[in-house]
Amino acid sequence: MPADRTGTDLDAALAGRKVVALFHATWCPFCRAFAPVFRRLAPSAVGYQPLEVVLDDDEDPLWTRFDVGLVPTVVFFDDGTITARLDGRPGVGIDEPMLLEALERAR
């Protein structure tokens, strides 16, 4: 589940497949805590390919393009179209039960 850093690479990764993507930043403590949980559980999303998108630059256009207001955020895609999302909560981020619930709903 390699981290993607450009919109062009992301478009290619999303085309023609179902993807569960973690949008995160290396400077975010909630992201650093959640990323191992995502890496462990995301592969269990039947039919979805896991992907990480690193948003370390505040000016990265992917923040706006995918309406990522804060990180971490998990987005489910089908052929590049957003089908569901799990936005982190301010001061909390995302925890394992929240991800498990989102993965279950995505089935």
Image (cartoon, rainbow, N blue to C red):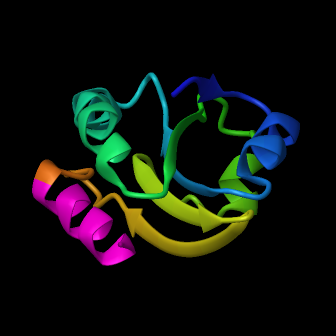
Residue 104 within the segment the image draws in magenta:
yes
25 sits left or right of 19 in the view: left
Which is nearer the eye, 83 or 87? 83
Which percent across, then down, holds residue 10?
Answer: 75, 42
Total tally of numbered discs in the picture: 0
Instruction: Please say if 67 is above or below 11.
Output: below
Q: Residue at x 81, y 35 (%)?
A: 9
Instruction: Please say if 13 is above or below 2.
Output: below
Quadrant housing residue 36: top left
Instruction: Please say if 39 is above or below 81.
Output: above
Residue 85 within the segment the image draws in magenta:
no
Q: Residue at x 73, y 64 (%)?
A: 79
Which percent across, then down, holds residue 18?
Answer: 60, 59
Q: Residue at x 54, y 39 (%)?
A: 51
40 sits left or right of 83 in the view: left
Q: Which residues are magenta?
A: 97-107
Q: Extreme right residue here?
A: 8
- The rendered magenta stretch, by its main secondary structure, is classed as helix
The quarter of the image holding the C terminus is bottom left
Which percent across, then down, holds residue 7?
Answer: 82, 41
Quadrant housing residue 57: top right
Instruction: Please say if 24 is above or below 82.
Output: above
Q: Extreme front residue here?
A: 47
Which percent across, then down, holds residue 102?
Answer: 29, 68
Which is nearer the eye, 56 or 73? 73
Q: Residue at x 75, y 60 (%)?
A: 65
